[in-house]
Image: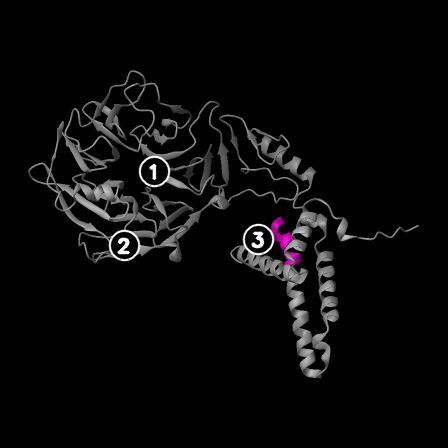
Amino acid sequence: MNTRINFDPGKINGKPGEIRDKMKKLKIHPKVVFIITGIAATIWFLERVIPELSRAAYPCMKVASPFLSGFIIYLLSVWSIIVAARNTGSRILYSRYIATFFLVAGVVVVMAETPSQNIVGIQEKDLVKTVKTASSSGSSVQQTGTPDCQIEAGKTATTINKVPSSGQKLENQESTGKGVSVKSFDEGFMARNFYSVVIDDDNVKWFLTDAGIVSFNGTKWQMHNKNRKVPATGLKDFAYDVSEYGRELWLATSQGATVATIPVDARSGATTYYKGNSTILSDTVVAVAVGKGALRWFGTDKGVSAFLNNKWLTYSYQRQYPESLFKDFPITAMATTPGGDSLYVATDGAGVARVFRNDVDAISGASEYAIWGPIEMPSDKVYSICITPDGTQWFGTDLGIARHIGSNTLENWSIFNSDNGLVDNFVQAIAYDKTGALWFGTKGGISVFIGEQWKSFTTNDGLISNNIQCIATDKTGTVWCGTDKGVVSFNNGAIINYR
């Protein structure tokens, strides 16, 4: 005996019931809701699928497709009725019932073509089988009932960042050709926000983090917080240097400029230069830069200081760059020319200042790069600088990139932004690799400039974060990027996330 079930919308409970009640209170007509939903589903579907047709198989797209199809069929039915009415001269144009009939018929057809079992992108047994396959290949993956992979410390998951739950599409993110992997920090390793990076001559990667100085030798992550002479917090920037005392790190801190001998352990020598024991302009040091020579540059909240052969250089740039300029427009980044005797100083609102060591061991100023002059800069808010071995200057701003080729200040400028390939306009870091490609870290991902072509990576390609705060290339050509959620490395097309 067949039992007929009557559907009463008034008895719907839970979230759908809440939505129904809100619609009643706002007195929103169901037709308005249908039209808005249809337009939103159509725009979303087209925006996601047109760049990459394979996305049409995503579960979220399968959910949106019935709304899109129903909306289009509704529009076609209304259009057909209007045409028919015009051709026949009848009053069918004013009939709502026929339009409703076409709408319902269209939705039924679409739902018949996309049954619920097809919306589920992966069955439970397939999920278990996939996880077991990943484990047998050498990775250590434990499924604990949540969508996230549980990865043992020091191990690598060679498949994906997340094991999808039922209803999600299982994907091996291989946008770079060799896939994405994840490695976990050791238990107790507290650093998560990595905002500055340098590489030493032994190919050890050094980072400034929210937990202090961190290093990675290729196998082990290590904290360096045992030396009482080295500040553990308030570190703004750092640079790698080799002097008569050996390998060193110069640190920009809120107490002065600190130089520490590597390996920066409890017994390493360290000295801090501040106004009480030197002629440095200020104790608040925000940036440091070291070229190939023996000259070290320090950006402070009052201007630029320089240190050469245990001597602090005098200043002769005050007329061009007064102290008030650096107070109003703080220094954000610095970079030297390949020789190290000239310095480019990025500021937050005054463009790029240029200073150099003159013949009498003083610091002189050159003309600034700023948009109020005849210079093609996208913005005066500059946050990153990179000088390539051939002397080409790259400046990252909040509105894109400026490139200057050659020594003529007024010529050979180019602008790059999101309109011509950059993934995001706010450029926080720039570096070049051994192939000559330029890497740009932005707040929206990474863009690589190869020749005159762009290639970008975001969390959709497997990155743990789109907020790329620093970039450096090591001796093997691996590119290391610090983010607010860990570290990303690129090597021959393979991406590794450390978190």
Q: Residue furthest left?
A: 360
Lateral position of residue 464 relative to residue 137, left or right: left
Residue 290 seen in the figure: no
Residue 130 lies in the magenta-colored region: no
Is 46 placed above or below 388 here? below
In the rendered image, is residue 456 in sight? yes
Q: Nearer the viewer, residue 432 or 288?
A: 288
Residue 203: image quadrant is: top left
Look at mark 1 in the image and give the residue it sits on.
Answer: 473
Which of 232 and 433 lies nearest the eye of the viewer?
232
Q: Is residue 436 above or below residue 228?
A: below
Q: Position of residue 108 (x, y in %)?
A: 74, 60
Query: Are there few (<14), some (14-19), or many (20+) residues within 10 Å of tag 2?
Result: many
The image shows residue 302 at horizontal and vertical percentages of 20, 37
User: Which range is magenta?
Assistant: 55-68
Give the residue type that dot 2 points to. Met
Q: Earlier in the sequence, mark 1 or mark 3?
A: 3
* Residue 60 magenta: yes
Image side of residue 488 versus residue 306, left or right: right
Of residue 441 and residue 11, the one placed in the foreground of this image is 11
Which residue position is annotated with label 3? 54
Residue at the spot of label 2: 377
